[in-house]
């Protein structure tokens, strides 16, 4: 495990806007104000090093931002959150894989993960593993790249 951690600045950004328990509404009928999130594209636009970044650099930065936006203050993803990201953000790679033994093995490994949470390195390995076995990757390989 890489043990990647958020900086204190990242943690502050992650927690920014969260109401403290004392500021929470006292009525159970009052809706809780949720902080408005900034889109990934706007977050990417604020990273000076990516202004002239390659498509690959921007792709990895996008994954890192999605991970950071979904992780807890310690920079880890709960298993349920990781599975939710797979269903919502990686759906085209996971669709149709549910019955395949390799995919089932990957999800079993996720369920049996000794820790209850995934760090960024574990999450990247999971994404890459699913990508390699996906039907979508086969479609990508068949795309014409030259006239």
Image (cartoon, grey):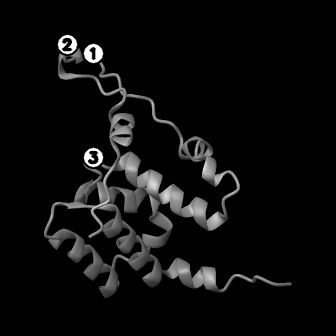
Instruction: Name the quadrant of the N terminus.
Output: bottom left
Circles 2 and 1, Cβ within 8 Å, touching? The answer is yes
Q: List x then y, in percent, for residue 56.
A: 61, 67
Residue at the location (32% across, 85% down)? 102
Give the quadrant of residue 121.
bottom left
Mark 1 Cα within 10 Å, few/some/many (few <14, many 20+)? Answer: few
- Write the residue at 55% across / 43% down: 43
In this rendering, the answer to whether 30 lies above or below 147 is above
Label 2, secondary structure: give it. Answer: loop
Report x, y in % for residue 18.
Answer: 31, 28
Residue 82 badge = none
Q: CA distance from mark 2 to mark 1?
A: 5 Å
**Residue farthest along the top direction in this orientation:** 26
Label 2: which residue?
27
Q: State which quarter of the image contains the C terminus.
A: bottom right
Q: Position of residue 140 (x, y in %)?
A: 62, 79
Residue at numbered disc 1: 30
* Mark found first going from the N terminus, 3 or 2: 2
Within 10 Å of disc 3 (Cα), the crowding (few <14, some 14-19, many 20+) is some
Whole-percent x and y of residue 58? 59, 59
Separation of residues labelled 1 and 3 (CA atoms): 26 Å
Please give the residue where the numbered disc 3 appears in the rendered image. 72
Is 50 situated left or right of 9 in this image?
Answer: right
Q: Is residue 126 left or right of residue 53?
A: left
């Amino acid at each position: 495990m890489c043990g990647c951690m958020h900086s204190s600045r990242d943690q502050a950004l992650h927690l920014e806007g969260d109401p403290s328990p004392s500021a929470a509404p006292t009525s159970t009928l009052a809706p809780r104000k949720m902080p408005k999130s900034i889109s990934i594209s706007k977050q990417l636009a604020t990273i000076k090093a990516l202004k002239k970044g390659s498509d690959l650099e921007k792709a990895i930065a996008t994954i890192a931002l999605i991970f950071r936006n979904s992780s807890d203050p310690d920079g880890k993803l709960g298993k349920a959150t990781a599975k939710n990201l797979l269903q919502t953000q990686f759906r085209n790679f996971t669709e149709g894989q549910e019955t395949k033994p390799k995919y089932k093995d990957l999800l079993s490994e996720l369920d049996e993960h000794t820790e209850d949470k995934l760090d960024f390195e574990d999450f990247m390995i999971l994404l890459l593993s699913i990508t390699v076995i996906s039907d979508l990757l086969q479609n990508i390989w068949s795309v014409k790249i030259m006239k």
